Amino acid sequence: MTKRNSWAKITLLLIGAFYALPMLAMARFSFQRMPVVKLGWSTLLDGWTIAPMVDAVTSARFLQASWLSLRLALLTVIISLAILVPTTVYVHVRLIKARAFIEFLSILPYVVPPIALVVGISGAMRSTVPGFLSNPFSLTPFYVIISLPFSFRSLDVGLSSIELKTLVEASRSLGAGWVRTVRSVILPNLRVGVINASFLTFAVVLGEFTIASLLLKFTLPAYMAEAQGNNPQGSFTVGLLLLVVSASLLGVVNRVTRKRGQEVQAIFL
Amino acid sequence: MEQKMSIQKYAIRISSINKSFGSVTALSDFNLELTKGELVTLLGPSGCGKTTALRIVAGFEKPDSGTIESNGLDIANQPAHKRQMGMVFQNYSLFPHMNVSENIGFGLKVRGIERAERDMHVAKVIERVRLTGLEMRYPHQLSGGQQQRVALARALVIEPQVLLLDEPLSALDAKVRAELRDEIRLLQSELGVATIFVTHDQDEAMGISDRICVMKDGQVQQSGSPQDVYLNPKNSFVARFVGAMNEFQIQSPNSGTTTKMLLRPDAISICQRGEPNSLNATVVGQHFGGIATMVRLRLDDQSATVSAHMLSRSVKVSAGESVGILLNTTEAIFEEVGSNGSQ
Amino acid sequence: MSITVIKGGGTLYERASTSFFKRVLPWFGILPFVIFVGIFLIWPSVSVFRSALQSVDGAEKPAILEAISGQYLKSILFSVRLSAITALIGMIIGTLVALAIVSLDQMRGLRNWMVGYSAVAANLGGIPLAFAFIASLGMQGLYTKILSVFGINLSAMGFKISDFSGIVLVYLYFQIPLMTLLMLPAIDGLKVTLREAAANLGASQRQYWTNIGLPLLTPSLLGGFLLLFANAFSAYATAFALSSGGTRLVSVQIRFYLQGNTITGKSNLGYALAAWMIIVMTLAMSGYLLLRRVSEKWQR
């Protein structure tokens, strides 16, 4: 048994190193103004500065891009929830037969890669509704679509586990009106699902590059691609920041999901 | 010479097994002998060590000390897969990706027995457990009772020295449980295979066993036939655990000490109030159970409630009635107040 | 529908119409969602296939067939090869990691940590990940330099982060944790009691794995492979950033047909390639879902 244990520990150590090393290199590159050729034991502690990061973060381009990304993320979350919450609640309470169909629709985005989707979008819409695509917020509905698998699953998993229909019937039979039922029975059980759906969607939108760049919208990832040329260190720090933010968002999702006794895998796949 | 011959009489002989998990003693000086064809039940509450004992016999745990003799060999240190035991688990543990035939034939397959011969043995035992026609089904397509019969067949087809049953009926519902219990007993005695049965359900134990070992805290409290254990419990733990018991507090008039008297419900009968040697009581309720009825009475003086188990035909009282009760104290067990009931 | 009149009033007509309403009306509730998906997912996808079925430049063959010939086929095969290799390696390593996590079950906190980070890493990708690897193993990478100190000259060995092997390595960063997440429940499903039942029936360690362990894991292994394949095949941003748009992967190449700097008429090829991507993804995802159904049945 102990032989198996030490093998397991070595495996995890190696994979941990694989996960950590690129991040460390990225951090070093971002914060140390020292070209790799000149890097050596003597120069190890030289050149550490946050100047490139400050430059990047205060630059007009960055502010413009992140402001757009932020608003897009918020808008996507709002619209996602506005469509999905009523739909999933409705399905669970009133039309459970439709659940399989809705679930099918929610995983359909998986078979259409973002790049293919963009191709289709410009083909379908460029000629028919030309004004639509020129608006930067036109990305929003497509972002709702690509985050659909996560957001639907998050809401659905929570509602499935509690047999919402029975709870609603119980509440109504005890005399509660619809408003009261929604407030006291439906919403509390949605909390975890809504948190998960929101955070996951937010993380996805912040990091989305394919659709944004091909529809020529200047979002945060587009900024990073552009800044790679004129301020590589700056753009790398922004990348690092984005990673930290995404990791935190997903970390919250993980913590919240674990409290429910599930592992996060249930949401992603 | 004689010694050797007497050892062969036993299918398995377990001696002086001790087992601790950290600071918890699971088994203390555990001894058990089984002859061929005998069914012994290890009966006790959770944590009494019965499952640990079974697992040690199966080879899933190693004892701290002691021996297990089978066929003249000490197998206490033999790995599980080399022992000739068949085990039926509480949750069936059928291999989900194999159908009924394949599950049953697995033990034969790993022993290198050829397909044709395997199929023959499997067919025979399938008939025995009445699963004919279900050979191609998969575990998730079977009911609980059917799955357990597959598990049984799987364990029996390898012709084990000892059959080990770990609470095999607790996951089933009542009717299936009773049916399967009788089937297990029938099969086991027909095939003459020594069997160790573990359960916490004393009804089950009494219905099926040649011998019962009542266990508590890792130790065997009493070992004997079901009648023996029920009618002559050695201590009040066994008395309380096997069958129901009424408790009476008796004050000794001279020394002022209090003693508890334990009496079976069927040792109490109802009579007219005021009859000699009777105690006054009021009927509180009845629980009709077909052949017999359990009448609950509250003693006027002690405000303790006792149960009298009587043939339904003899019960002529109703709730609220004042009656007298007669105690057949020849079967009573006495214990000092403050003791925990074990010896 | 039977033609009976309800006792106590109510005409035939009333009966029929309430029944119709009761059956169909509720489905209107999901209409907003369906319409939304229809406009923003189905319509673009249909348009992809519509253009793909048209011909290129007035030639005879529809674009969708043109796309799998000659040089275009090379791109598709390049993507398929890359996806298959990252899926295979990801499958093997991811499973080993999952096995390691489960066997160290006593260290409870460890599992939560690993699952947590795997969930993050599995969804990582795109620009930041590419940046991290460029900083690690690019021409000016930290580890490139460190390795050269030990005498290992990566560029002399022909390794470039923007080439096939580089992209494979970067993709593994999210493929491995994805497989780990997939395999954990499958390995959990190999309950101890199954192992004990097998041993009790006489099976050695090896016999257990050959007859029970591996067969039970196979649907998850294959399903995982397909999911990883689909995941890699559809990826765009990471490879784009690593190669500055120059890689031969289909996903990135489609871009050329889209940006308008194409010879008119050839744009249908872009649609065709996109259509093929959707076809491949549909096959892979269907396979994955089918296999997942099998393994769920066994886990009861």
Image (tube, coloured by chain):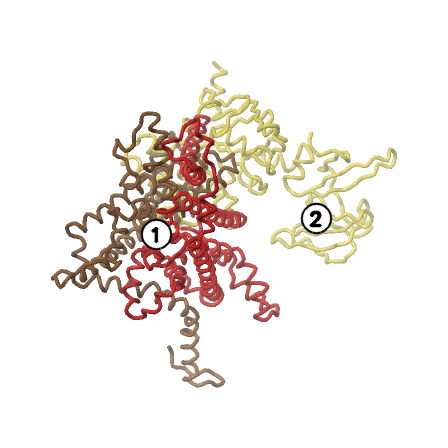
Marked residue chain, label 1: C
Residue C31 image point, x, y percent = 40, 70
Dot 1: within a 10 Å radius of its alpha carbon, few (fewer than 14), some, or many (20 or more) residues? some
Q: What residue is disc 2 on?
A: B308
- Identify the hue of chain B: yellow
Q: Residue visible at 45% across and 47% down?
A: A55
On the question of residue B224 being in view, the answer is: yes
Colour in which the image shows chain C: brown
Amino acid under disc 1: Leu
Q: What is the x, y in percent for residue C13?
A: 41, 84
Judged from the image, the secondary structure of the residue bearing numbered disc 2 is strand
Colour of chain A, in one word, is: red
What residue type is disc 2 on?
A: Ala
Instruction: Give residue C257's quadrant in the image.
Output: bottom left
Residue placed most toward the observer, C192 or B128? C192
Vertical comparison of C229 with C61: above or below = above
Q: Nearer the viewer, mark 1 or mark 2?
A: 1
Asked whether C219 or C178 is in front, the reply is C178
Q: Chain of mark 2?
A: B
Q: Is residue C105 above or below residue B15?
A: below
**Residue B96 at x, y = what percent?**
38, 44
Residue B329: x %, y % from top left: 74, 39
